[in-house]
Amino acid sequence: MTEFPDARMIAAGDVNLAVYERDGDPARRRPPIMLVHGWPEIAYSWKNMIGPLSDAGFRVIALDLKGFGASDAPEDPALYDAAHMTGDFCALLDALSIEKAIFCGHDWGGALVWAMAQRHPGRVAGVIGLCTPVLPCPPAPPLAIFRKRFGDAHYIVQFQEDGVAEALFESDPDRFFRLIFQRPAPKERWASLVPRIYDLPGRFRGAPEPDAADLIVPLTDLQVYVDAYKKSGFRGGVNLYRNIDRNWETMKDRDQTVYAPALWIGAELDLFLPPESADAMEKIVPDLEKHIVANCGHWIMREKPDETNALMIDWLNRRFSA
C-alpha cells in the first residue's frame, strides 16, 4: 500500500489548507484530481485511492477541508456554506496554478464537488461522486423535509443547535469513531433500524459499546482519525450541516446543471445514501455514467477500495486520455 503523503500548508484565500499530493503526471498531460473528503473524515480517508490514481498517471491532490484535520478552522458557521467552501477550492486551484481539475468527493465532499461544478463550471474538468448524488433542488427547505420525514431526532436536525453536537462527540472521540466505522447492516434489517439509525447523538449516548470486530478500518487508522479530531474538534464538520438551508436558498433559483462529464458510484448497502437516491440525477447531469458497488456500505473507500478504484480509473482513462 502506498504511504500517505505528508501535508504541506497552502494559503488559499483567507484560509490555510493542508494538502497531500502524489504526482503521477509530471508532464501535465491530464487534469489533476482533487480528492474531497466528507464528514466525519479527513484527507487520510483517501489512503487507499491516492496511490492507485497517481499510478494510473494522474496528479492527485487530497486536502483537509476547512475546519478539518490540519487546515484552518474558523468559528463562524456561515463560512462553511457551499459558496465559501467552493470558493476555497478555487483559491486552492489558483495557489497551485491549476486552471481546471477533476473533482472527486465522498459524502459531504460529494455534495461539495457537485456544487463546485454548478457554481464554478469553468474550473471543473470532470466530477466523480462517491455515494453522494446531486439532485434538483427540492420544493421546500431541506430541514423542513427532514423534520417531516424523520422527526426532530434526525442527526441533521439536531446538528442545528450551536455547540451541542460537537461538545458531545468531543467527549469521547474514540467511541465516536468506533460507532461510525461499523460494517453495514444487510438490507433485510433496514426497516427495523429506521429512524433510530439517524439519531446519531442518541446512539452515541446510549448504544452498546461498539464491537471492534465489526470495524471496517484497522485500529491504527482509527487512531489517526481520533488524534486528528482531538486536535481540530468537531465544530468545522458540524458547521457544514448548519448551512443546508442556506445552500438550498442560494441554489434553487439558478442553473443547477452539471455540464462537466460525471461519474457516480453508489454503494448497495449505503443506508444513508441508498442507490435509489440517485435516480433523478440525469435531470441535471446530462453526461453521466453510474455504477453501484455490491455488498458495500457508505464508507466505500474503506470497504471496497479496489472495486472503486477500478471503476474510477476506467472512466478517467476513457474520458481524459493522456
Image: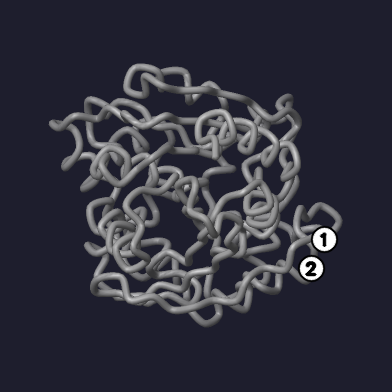
Disc 1: which residue = 212
Q: Quadrant of residue 93?
A: bottom left
Q: Give amino acid for label 1.
A: Ala
| Percent x, y of residue 176 | 62, 65
Is residue 177 shown to the viewer in this render? yes
**Residue at image coords 72%, 41%:** 184
| Percent x, y of residue 258 | 32, 30
Q: Quadrant of residue 41?
A: bottom right
| Circle on res. 46 | none
Q: Residues within 10 Å of mark 1 (few under 14, many from 20)?
A: some
| Percent x, y of residue 24 | 61, 56
**Residue at image coords 49%, 38%:** 128
Is residue 195 shown to the viewer in this render? no
Disc 2: which residue = 219
Determine whether the residue tagged by mark 2 lies in a helix, strand or loop: helix
Is the C-beta separation of discs 2 and 1 under 8 Å? yes
Number of numbered discs on residues: 2
| Percent x, y of residue 37 | 51, 55
| Left or right placement of residue 89 versus residue 292 in this view | left
Q: Quadrant of residue 161?
A: bottom left
Q: In the rendered view, tell whether residue 15 sits above or below residue 275.
A: below
| Left or right placement of residue 98 versus residue 218 in this view | left
Q: In the rendered view, tell whether residue 43 sits above or below residue 111.
A: below
Q: Give amino acid for label 2.
A: Leu
**Residue at image coords 45%, 32%:** 133
| Left or right placement of residue 159 versus residue 310 in this view | left
Placement of the N terminus among the 4 image quadrants? bottom right
Q: Residues within 10 Å of mark 2 (few under 14, many from 20)?
A: few
* Residue farthest along the front direction in this orientation: 27
* Residue farthest along the right direction in this orientation: 213
- Mark 2 and mark 1: Cα distance apart in space: 8 Å
Of the image marks 2 and 1, the number of the one nearer the N terminus: 1
